[in-house]
Image (spheres, rainbow, N blue to C red):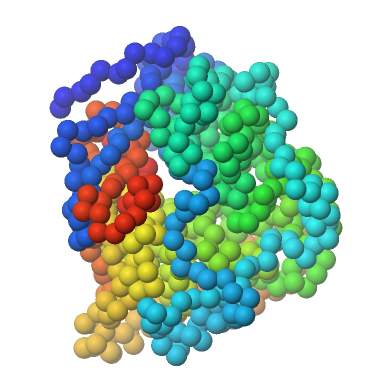
């Protein structure tokens, strides 16, 4: 295999522990630049509506470990490489022009009935809606809208948009190692196209801010290197973004959260030294419609809502004071602090415990009322986070779940995990409707293409540890029951007792969880209620199986770990769509050379 040499070092070569260094001795490591390639002949993706071409192939340089970091030790005696220190690369695209947005399948009308699970299920009983009919929803209330303590804080802030107080370039914090700013960053920001794309990416202990609309897009506007932690996730606030202000939050392996405003180069540190929760932040998202609140998932199974402008305080779970709290806890959700709590002077705003295992990812529904959470215990949990309650618990075919996303109309949830399958769940029918088979390893990311979705036809993409990018199309009319169900009803009846036993087993495992205030007299958990929440695993032959419409492999690259951002553009241009909108899918792929 032809291997290109690494680019020359950008700055001085540090002394650190190299991966695989003999006897853990410190050796010099070359720190490289980002590389962008324009492959000859492109990388055509053949799909039904035309051919998509690869525009940019961006390779993000992996930063070397800090000299203070200990060598990586893999406990597996059969392993030949050290354990990767992070959960991988995460990248997000931002257009500061708010007029450039994906199509919205919702229409908010005050006269429409409120959107909830009951209204969906009733409409499903009457039959599926036609393509001419559109789902109508009332705008969801803000999170914690009924709490006067939170309302006072929002009124006090007024309309002034605050920024962090600390200058990250001149910071003396031991948490920030160094900040590398582009020498002409101010000029590039002044001359850039307002419709251009910003890109933010975290890779190990580095965080990149890139301008993809610039000719030299591989040179970051700013690159932050951290000392005591690796950045595992980040998110950009879509509500507050503008050409002069961008709010970014980053979650680290130490539990610390960074609120970063890149244009002013200011930052603030939240959950410092794990004051609220000292476990790693596995996923982080701004709460839809909120300027200050964001939700962070921690590796110990907790979901915590933080306020970017509040100080931290040593957190201890509050005493259960209401019946609503007890009923929520009986639904496998332990409320450590409710959003309705009167104590809102410091973080956290609210805290929930779902399980004792790692939360892999979560996603907010388009109606801004529900939350889909996937965990390493192999469950998909749907929450009404405004009411702080669990509505459904689904189980994977086997293994843990890794990724989750909602369809643009909020009818379906797509998950991927360790069973090598992409699974489609119906929120209205409260069950699995299809499994998608095509990956040869764990599925690491799924995403819908909003410009290729309507009320009946959907397209989404997925990537996995097998270094494959797959595209999937499905239509509600094509999801027929397998022939085995139509010809042999007795076979279905024979597996029903086993499914009930499995459901009871999962219910028992949920009922053994302890509340945060375990020293108090505990209310017995209603197992019948949990039976209604927990849905059993459906055998593979009872569920429709979908093949991918397109598959492409990214193997054979010249680096052991490469971050690839694939932005595909339709060369046939069947419809008049702006260039920034002709995005087929944006997925980050970790590729291992063979």
Q: Quadrant of the N terminus?
A: top left
Say left or right for 19 vs 44: right
Choose between 66 and 169: the one closer to the eye: 169
Q: Residue at x 69, y 48 (%)?
A: 292
Q: Residue at x 63, y 64 (%)?
A: 385
Q: Quadrant of the C terminus?
A: top left
Q: How many marks?
A: 0
Can you give x and y, in whole percent of width and height, for residue 171 in the image?
67, 20
Say left or right for 324 vs 413: right
Name the image quarter holding residue 354: bottom right
Name the image quarter holding residue 215: top left
Q: Let me know if residue 502 appears in the view.
A: no
Choose between 355 and 6: the one closer to the eye: 6
Say left or right for 544 vs 511: left
Choose between 537 and 42: the one closer to the eye: 42
Choose between 406 and 389: the one closer to the eye: 406
In the displayed structure, would residue 408 be above or below residue 128? above
Q: Residue at x 35, y 74 (%)?
A: 456
Can you give x and y, in whole percent of width and height, for residue 267 in the image?
66, 31
Name the image quarter holding residue 486: bottom left
Q: Residue at x 53, y 50 (%)?
A: 98
Say left or right for 352 vs 491: right
Q: Let me know if residue 493 appears in the view.
A: yes
In the displayed structure, would residue 474 be above or below residue 377? below
Can you give x and y, in whole percent of width and height, for residue 479 in the image?
29, 76
Can you give x and y, in whole percent of width and height, for residue 260 in the image?
62, 34
In the displayed structure, would residue 283 be above or below residue 201? below
């Amino acid at each position: 295999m032809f291997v290109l040499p690494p680019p020359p070092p950008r700055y001085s070569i540090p002394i650190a522990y190299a991966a695989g260094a003999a006897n853990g001795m410190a050796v010099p490591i070359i720190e490289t630049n980002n590389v962008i390639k324009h492959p000859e002949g492109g990388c055509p993706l053949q799909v039904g509506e035309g051919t998509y071409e690869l525009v940019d192939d961006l390779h993000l340089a992996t930063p070397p470990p800090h000299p203070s970091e200990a060598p990586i030790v893999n406990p597996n005696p059969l392993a030949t490489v050290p354990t990767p220190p992070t959960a991988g690369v995460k990248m997000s695209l931002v257009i500061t022009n708010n007029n450039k947005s994906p199509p919205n399948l919702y229409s908010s009308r005050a006269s429409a009935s409120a959107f909830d699970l009951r209204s969906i299920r009733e409409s499903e009983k009457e039959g599926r809606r036609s393509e001419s009919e559109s789902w109508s929803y009332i705008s969801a209330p803000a999170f914690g809208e009924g709490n006067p303590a939170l309302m006072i804080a929002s009124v006090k802030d007024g309309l002034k948009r605050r920024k962090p107080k600390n200058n990250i370039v001149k910071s003396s914090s031991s948490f920030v190692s160094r900040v590398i700013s582009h020498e002409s960053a101010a000029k590039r920001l002044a001359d850039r196209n307002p419709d251009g794309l910003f890109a933010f990416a975290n890779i190990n202990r580095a965080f990149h801010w890139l301008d993809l609309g610039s000719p030299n897009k591989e040179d970051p506007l700013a690159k932050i290197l951290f000392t005591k932690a690796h950045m595992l996730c980040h998110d950009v606030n879509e509500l507050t973004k503008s050409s002069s202000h961008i709010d970014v939050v980053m979650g680290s392996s130490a539990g610390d959260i960074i609120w970063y405003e890149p244009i002013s180069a200011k930052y603030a540190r939240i959950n410092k030294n794990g004051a609220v929760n000292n476990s790693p932040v596995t996923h982080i998202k701004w709460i839809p419609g909120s300027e200050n609140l964001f939700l962070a998932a921690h590796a110990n199974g907790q979901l915590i809502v933080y306020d970017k402008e509040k100080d931290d305080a040593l957190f201890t779970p509050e005493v259960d004071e209401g019946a609503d709290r007890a009923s929520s806890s009986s639904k496998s959700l332990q409320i450590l602090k409710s959003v309705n709590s009167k104590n809102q002077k410091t973080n956290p705003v609210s805290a929930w415990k779902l399980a004792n295992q790692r939360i892999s990812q979560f996603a907010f529904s388009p109606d801004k009322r529900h939350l889909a959470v996937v965990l390493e215990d192999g469950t998909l949990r749907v929450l009404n986070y405004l009411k702080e309650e669990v509505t459904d618990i689904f189980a994977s075919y086997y293994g843990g779940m890794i990724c989750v996303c909602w369809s643009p109309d909020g009818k379906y949830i797509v998950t991927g995990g360790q069973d090598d399958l992409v699974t489609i769940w119906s929120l209205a029918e409260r069950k699995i409707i299809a499994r998608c088979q095509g990956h040869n390893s764990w599925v690491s990311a799924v995403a819908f293409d909003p410009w290729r979705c309507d009320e009946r036809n959907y397209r989404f993409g997925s990537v996995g540890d097998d270094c494959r990018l797959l595209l999937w199309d499905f239509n509600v009319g094509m999801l027929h029951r397998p022939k085995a169900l139509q010809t042999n009803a007795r076979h279905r009846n024979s597996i029903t007792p086993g499914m009930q036993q499995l459901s009871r087993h999962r219910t028992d495992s949920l009922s053994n969880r302890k509340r945060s205030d375990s020293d108090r007299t505990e209310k017995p958990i209603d197992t019948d209620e949990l039976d209604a929440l927990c849905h059993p695993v459906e055998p593979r032959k009872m569920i429709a199986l979908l093949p991918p419409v397109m598959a492409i492999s990214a193997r054979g690259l010249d680096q052991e770990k490469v971050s690839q951002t694939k932005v595909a553009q339709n060369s046939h241009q069947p419809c008049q769509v702006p260039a920034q909108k002709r995005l087929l899918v944006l997925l980050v792929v970790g590729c291992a050379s063979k």
